[in-house]
Image: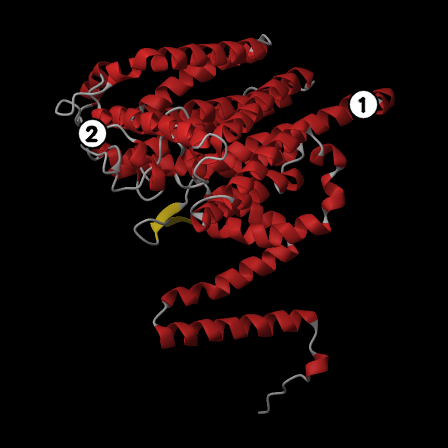
């Protein structure tokens, strides 16, 4: 029997793909065996993802969204970790997505590119890169800024193409809610084996969540979509009933996460619902800024903040939730007071570097020299290299006062435009979807008061998605409400 090999000029594009894939498989196998680098076995998967992303990039985009609740944090070194498979997919979209955006830039539309929220977001990102250029630790800041860039491309610009119609919004709901509910059920069942004890709340969230805080934050920020998404389906519809069931799953998960921030966020979201309904967002923003300013001034006046310094020996870790709540009120909870220690240090960093900060991603490398021993706790050595646990302060520390202001302008812009988009939407289902977006965004803002999880895939992705979805719906509403469409209707 003879095997005929086609001549070079006779190979069609389909055959080229097959031969290329076979070559990649052989190279990965021999390369892995020869070098003992078994990660090379994953090259064929990368090849297939690249191929599918070129042929039908939307399928890979749905895969990325599906993987957000299921991603696993994998340490690369003592100071670096990655989220699999979401982060490699985001890097893929940074490469393929940029090519896609360049070749389809005319489809983005002037309305999207020149939308006020797009311009403010680009101002925020642009300042991040400006601070990177002058950073004392340029490489660290560059890594941070590149990560921010692949979030921007994946969850903002590409969302313009793949989340622009109502059928896409429904897919968005289910493609995240299903794996999120599955991860929640697995966590709750595992936790039940330990009697839902508080001291096991962290360990049972593995492998899908770093800790109980990330777990609760992911559940609570997506809760508005599950609750309000029912409006897409009539009463009695099976999917409406399924949504109520999954809402119950999320609530059980949140309850047994023992996360104070998540509990408070639910109450904030309920209040925000009525604020948006009655067009009180601007008033609420003005009051919030006023209260924060007055509190800040009182703290610095005559060094009043020193009265809140903890007692070192009494500030300890608590293993019962009731004790934790009581200790928090007394200023004796170690996690709360360690935050205060870093916040005080952060304020002094801002005072020393007011214009462009110490550079993106550099809080850990600089804050210790500005800290006060009076606020130190047993964990102030910070072996985990964790952040400041307040994203608003983090912006000031790493990007100066202008960076903090740009971020606040972005937040106010999203809330103001979001309320306007909500009241302009004619469809009840779309209004509820806009409300879910806004409540999700507000929950993220609440979480950022005591965390800086916007840098994680499970929170940061939704921050950018919320802004993109609002812009898409605003453009959708303008088209629906245009005089031409109204005359045709």
Compared across the picture, whether 31 is left or right of 2 comes to: left
Q: Nearer the viewer, residue 363 or 459?
A: 363
Front position in the image: 341 or 323: 341
Element type at marker 1?
A: loop
Q: Is residue 383 above or below residue 4?
A: above
Please tell me whether residue 70 is drawn above or below residue 4 in the rendered image: above
Q: Determine the residue positioned at 59% across, 49% down.
A: 59
The CA span between labels 1 and 2 is 60 Å
Q: Is residue 27 left or right of residue 317?
A: right
- Image: 288 above or below 442: above
Q: Is residue 75 left or right of residue 103?
A: left
Report x, y in % for residue 207: 32, 44
Residue 16 rendering spot, x and y as whole percentages = 64, 73
Q: Note whether residue 195 is visible.
A: no
Picture quarter containing residue 324? Answer: top left
Residue 71's disc number: none
- Looking at the image, tell me whether mark 1 or mark 2 is earlier in sequence order: 2
- The residue indicated by pointer 2 is 377
Residue at which label 1 appears:
482
- Say which quarter of the image contains residue 382: top left
**Residue count near mark 1 (Cα–Cα under 10 Å), binned few <14, some 14–19, many ≥20:** few
Q: Secondary structure at mark 2?
A: loop
How busy is the neighbourhood of tag 2: few (under 14 within 10 Å), some, or many (20 plus)? many
């Amino acid at each position: 029997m003879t095997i005929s090999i086609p001549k070079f000029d006779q190979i069609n594009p389909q055959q080229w793909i097959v031969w290329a894939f076979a070559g990649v498989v052989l190279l990965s196998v021999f390369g892995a065996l020869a070098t003992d680098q078994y990660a090379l076995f994953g090259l064929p998967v990368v090849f297939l993802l690249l191929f599918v992303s070129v042929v039908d990039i939307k399928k890979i985009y749905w895969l990325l969204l599906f993987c957000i609740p299921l991603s696993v944090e994998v340490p690369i070194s003592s100071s670096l970790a990655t989220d699999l498979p979401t982060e490699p997919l985001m890097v893929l979209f940074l490469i393929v997505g940029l090519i896609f955006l360049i070749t389809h830039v005319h489809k983005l539309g002037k309305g999207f590119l020149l939308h006020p929220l797009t311009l403010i977001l680009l101002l925020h990102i642009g300042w991040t890169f400006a601070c990177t250029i002058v950073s004392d630790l340029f490489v660290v800041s560059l890594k941070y800024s590149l990560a921010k860039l692949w979030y921007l491309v994946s969850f903002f610009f590409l969302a313009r193409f793949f989340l622009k119609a109502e059928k896409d919004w429904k897919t968005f709901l289910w493609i995240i809610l299903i794996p999120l509910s599955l991860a929640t059920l697995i966590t709750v069942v595992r936790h039940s084996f330990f009697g839902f004890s508080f001291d096991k709340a962290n360990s049972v969230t593995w492998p899908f969540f770093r800790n109980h805080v990330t777990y609760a934050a992911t559940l609570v920020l997506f809760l508005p979509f599950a609750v309000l998404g029912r409006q897409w389906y009539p009463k009695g519809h099976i999917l409406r009933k399924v949504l109520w069931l999954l809402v119950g799953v999320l609530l059980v998960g949140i309850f047994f996460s023992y996360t104070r921030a998540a509990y408070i966020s639910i109450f904030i979201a309920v209040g925000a619902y009525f604020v948006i309904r009655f067009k009180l967002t601007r008033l609420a923003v003005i009051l919030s800024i006023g209260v924060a300013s007055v509190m800040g001034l009182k703290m610095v006046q005559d060094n009043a903040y020193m009265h809140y310094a903890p007692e070192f020996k009494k500030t300890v870790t608590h293993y019962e939730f009731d004790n934790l709540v009581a200790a928090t009120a007394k200023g004796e909870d170690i996690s709360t007071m360690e935050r205060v220690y870093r916040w005080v240090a952060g304020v002094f960093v801002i005072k020393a570097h007011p214009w462009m900060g110490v550079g993106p991603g550099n809080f850990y490398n600089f804050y210790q020299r500005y800290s006060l021993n009076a606020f130190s706790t047993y964990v102030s050595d910070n072996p985990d290299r964790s952040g400041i646990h307040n994203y608003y302060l983090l912006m000031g520390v790493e990007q100066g006062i202008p960076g903090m202001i740009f971020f606040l302008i972005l937040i106010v812009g999203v809330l103001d435009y979001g309320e306007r988009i909500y009241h302009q939407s004619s469809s009840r289902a779309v209004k509820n979807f806009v409300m879910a977006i806004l409540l999700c965004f507000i929950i993220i803002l609440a979480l950022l008061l005591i965390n800086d999880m916007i840098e994680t895939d499970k929170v940061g992705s939704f921050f950018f998605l919320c802004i993109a979805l609002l812009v898409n719906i605003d453009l959708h509403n303008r088209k629906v409400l245009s005089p031409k469409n109204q005359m045709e209707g």
